[in-house]
Amino acid sequence: MKGCKNLILLGVCALLLAACGKEVVDSRQIDVSDGLAYKHGLTDPYTGIASFKGFGAMPDAIKTYWLRNEKFRVEEWVKVTMSAQVDCDVSYAKGLMSGPVKCTNQSGDTLLTAAIANERFDGPSTIHNPLTGKLFAELNWKAGSPDGKQVYYGKDGKTVVDEFNIAGGQKDGREVVRTEAGDVYADGVWAQGHPSSGTISEDGGSLFTFSDGKKNGPATIYKGTNEPPSKGAYKNDNRDGTWVDPSGLRYDVFNLAEKGGFKSYNPAGDRIFGAPGTRYSGISANAVSVTSTWSEGMLNGPFKAFDQQGKVLLSMTMKDGSIDGVVDYEDPDTKSMAQITVTDGIVADSGNGTAENSTTIVPPTPEERASANAAALASQAAVSFGNPSSASPAAPAPVASAATAPQPPAAPPTPAANAVTSAATANTVATGNTDGSAHAQVPHTYQAGFDCTKAQTPTETTICADPVLSALDADVSAQYRALAKQADASQKSALLSRQRTYLTVRGQCSDERSCIERLTRSRLQDLREQAAKTPGALISTLQSDKASGA
């Protein structure tokens, strides 16, 4: 027994000599000047190990790496940043981060391991949940970019929920996505960054079937907060057959139908699609689900819209993308049914209309229609939709309300490599803080929750240049203000603190769109969950549910 103890001690000593042959100093003894680290009072750049106590003291490069690869919700990051249970030892060589990085909790359990070479993350890395200590990911890096096998784990720290390979900065080879229970949700193959075959899962749990590098087969698409998914099928990257759209994509489908004949100057068009300046009024605003028929990516066949109870609000036929034949619709004002007939672009009086109903409809040219289809159905790659019904139902079952709508399947953690952007401020690891000033002026801005004319940081300008991110930011701001109005003094203080932390964490995303969207959606969900428990605080209309992302 004594011999065994001696052997163990010898082994420990050998490890200490190998790993600890460098000087170890408290990070408070480190000064940073011109991007180089110096030990306080010395003039030569520091070589050794700096020990950082607490998450707040951690170098920005390490925090950013953790943030971009640990798919936390904002509320979870609030807990992490307010906690001092994370300590990190970071290696330096001649004033620059270089060598092993290791972070632990107060019990000494490993929370993060990584290696840095030439100011870039390089080699294997493990990431644990800093709150629970459970394993979250096993990643591989090369010169600052994901490279090789990437494995993500579920909440139990044991179940593999996403496993894939990165080659040359792109997904390549088989990817298997599983639920938290370990059931296979998607099993597909990538070829140089492009889906090739099998089933591919995207952000939010959307699921697509591929063959020969194109969408071919069933698809399920989630878009919108707490809304059921759109379901249908694709053929050669185009919608095909019957589609049911209770998700936010119903607005895109309505827009395509509107381009197929009705114009704002037609009274019936105003009732169905909304008068000028009120894009989401009329039936398009009241419908919670749309059932449509497609051929080669164009609306071709029956088109119906339903309200919350499954009542038909609109029934018409589309032919090659244009409205054709009898159109039955409910007048949003009188709640009575009306009917018109469209033939060769002319609205004929059906007997219950007025002289105005004889207005000529100017159908779009084939080129305009094709362009509109391509633009709408390519937006966000989202108008890729899913899982077909074998036959078009006369009327779908009532769509669940926002409170009871089915949620996306436990969406697997989405690796930063999906975008495949280099994390860790991705290609470069800077010792000092990132300069967040002056960003290039964006060519076009949308209405965000802040004044885009004053946007300066990369995160702000990225939001202002993107319709979906702008809408999400506007929703967060609106919901935050609505909550603040109903909160007492103590609640306002906590609400403000969390909002500031959210903005700080989101700022770490820089101009990485997927990171910004994920954190903004997370914050919006947190705010709405809180608002649902506060009388009069839940806003009813979300701009992000209507943003097409075009």
Image (cartoon, rainbow, N blue to C red):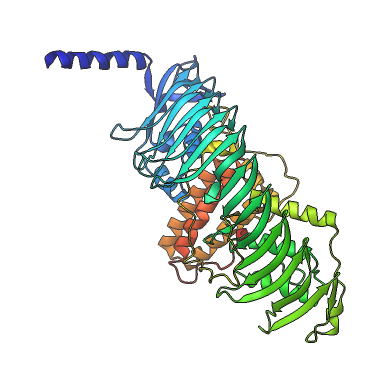
68 or 172: nearer the viewer: 172
In the picture shown, does residue 206 fall above or below 94?
below
Camera sees residue 546: no
419 or 393: nearer the viewer: 393
Q: In which quarter of the image is residue 4?
A: top left
User: Is residue 290 toward the left or the right of residue 166 in the image?
Assistant: right
User: Is residue 275 toward the left or the right of residue 208 in the image?
Assistant: right
Q: Quadrant of residue 213?
A: top right
Q: Where is residue 422 in the image (x, y as percent from the top left)?
A: 57, 32
Residue at 28% across, 34% down: 107
Residue at 12% across, 17% down: 1
484 or 378: nearer the viewer: 378
Q: Where is residue 169 in the image (x, y as percent from the top left)?
A: 59, 29
User: Is residue 304 toward the left or the right of residue 87 in the image?
Assistant: right
Camera sees residue 257: yes
Q: Position of residue 29 (x, y in %)?
A: 41, 24
Q: In which quarter of the image is residue 21?
A: top left
